[in-house]
Amino acid sequence: MTVLIITHSQDNESIPLVIKSIEAQGEKAFRFDTDRFPTEVHLDVYYSNGYERQILTVDDSRLDLAEVSGVWYRRIAMGAKIPTTMEKQFREASIGECRATIGGMIASIKGFHLDALPNIRLADNKQLQLQIAREVGLVTPRTLITNNPLAVKEFSQECKQGMITKMLSSFAIYDKQGTEQVVFTNPVNDEDLKHLDGLRFCPMTFQEKVPKALELRTIVVGKRLFTAAVDSQQMQKAKYDWRKQGLALLHSWEPYDLPKNVELLLLKFMAKFGLNYGAIDIIVTPDGQHVFLEINPVGEFFWLECCPPYLPISKAIAEILLTDIQEEKQENPEKILLSLSN
């Protein structure tokens, strides 16, 4: 069996971890760094009467895509090595054609996909996430997404414990020195409510401040759930977003047992999107309530394996990629939960 890993050259430790796990089971992994296409990687797609062939060539290695049994979609950075000196409109056209070519390649591979691109793109919608989470019975924060300052002021009156703001999309702002400034979750105070004019240029997401006893990261891999907890409130700068102190908290994560009813709801949520993998963020309140925040359908896990609590996530990913589970598709979460208990 051969697993095709779709990523880019700058991806993190998760790639070698999964490759090692695949090879430990006697199977093959083929890494495709999308930033090297089309400048350093060749793809030949050939169709004729009664015959088709797709060959991916990376350095001296060739892969017949008909031999691929599983696809792990991790990251994409199409055309990153196309010279920036190329005229802008031609460079953008080239990148667009690369995306179409590789997108067609991925869609035409008949093996198991972790996960199907249409499912990933659908699940990337944070608004839909909240809607589906509520439908399956998960607790979510009171939320407002708006470009209307008046609506924000009215909403703030509903948030008796305070209010935070964040963005729906992931991006960074770069200062004049080129330093990356990541946009994190931040509190909103009374003074901020006097300066909301910028909403006319960009909508924002506002949520009630949920009191935190712990913050959880749950990694779902097929039927298995791996959950770790961190006390983000131990550090002032991490109170609203633990990622601000991600390195400082690196060794503070501990294994956590989710209640079975919460696991069941998460599996139902995953089934709604047709996902087999996802990284889910949850708040545990001081009174023990589990509040769903969001899912990243291609979210990170490597630090939970390389550092405490050393969860065997890469092994689980390798196993699901090497096992044909297409008949199950997580259509019966109750059956899955029962298998988790055995």
Image: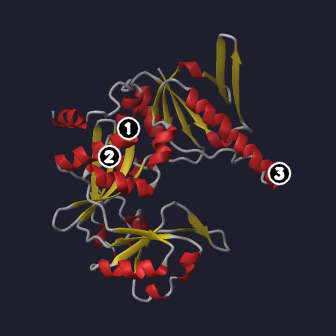
- Distance Cα–Cα, label 3 vs label 1: 40 Å
- Residue 227 location, x and y as percent? 28, 49
| Above or below: residue 164 compared with residue 126 | below
Three-letter amino acid code of the residue under disc 1:
Asn
- Mark in front: 2 vs 3: 2
Marks 1 and 2, how far apart at CA: 11 Å
Q: Secondary structure at mark 2?
A: helix
Residue under circle 3? 86
Q: Is residue 265 left or right of residue 6?
A: left
Q: Nearer the viewer, residue 312 or 65?
A: 65
Q: Nearer the viewer, mark 1 or mark 2?
A: 2
Horizontal placement of 333 versus 106: left or right?
left
Q: Which residue is mark 2?
A: 269
Indicate which disc, 2 or 3, sits on the residue closer to the N terminus: 3
- Counting labels gives 3
For mark 2, does the 10 Å Cα neighbourhood hold few (<14), some (14 to 19), or many (20 or more) residues? Answer: many
**Residue at the disc numbered 1:** 276
Q: Residues within 10 Å of mark 3 (few under 14, many from 20)?
A: few
Q: Could you give the CA–CA distance between mark 2 and mark 3, rounded to whole angstroms?
A: 44 Å
Between residue 148 and residue 76, name the one nearer to us: 148
Residue 152 higher or lower than 15, as above or below: below
Mark 3 secondary-structure assignment: loop
Q: Position of residue 37 (x, y in %)?
A: 69, 38
In the picture, the quarter occupied by the C terminus is top left
Q: Secondary structure at mark 1?
A: loop
Above or below — where is 176 with respect to 13? below
Name which of mark 1 and mark 2 comes first in the sequence: 2
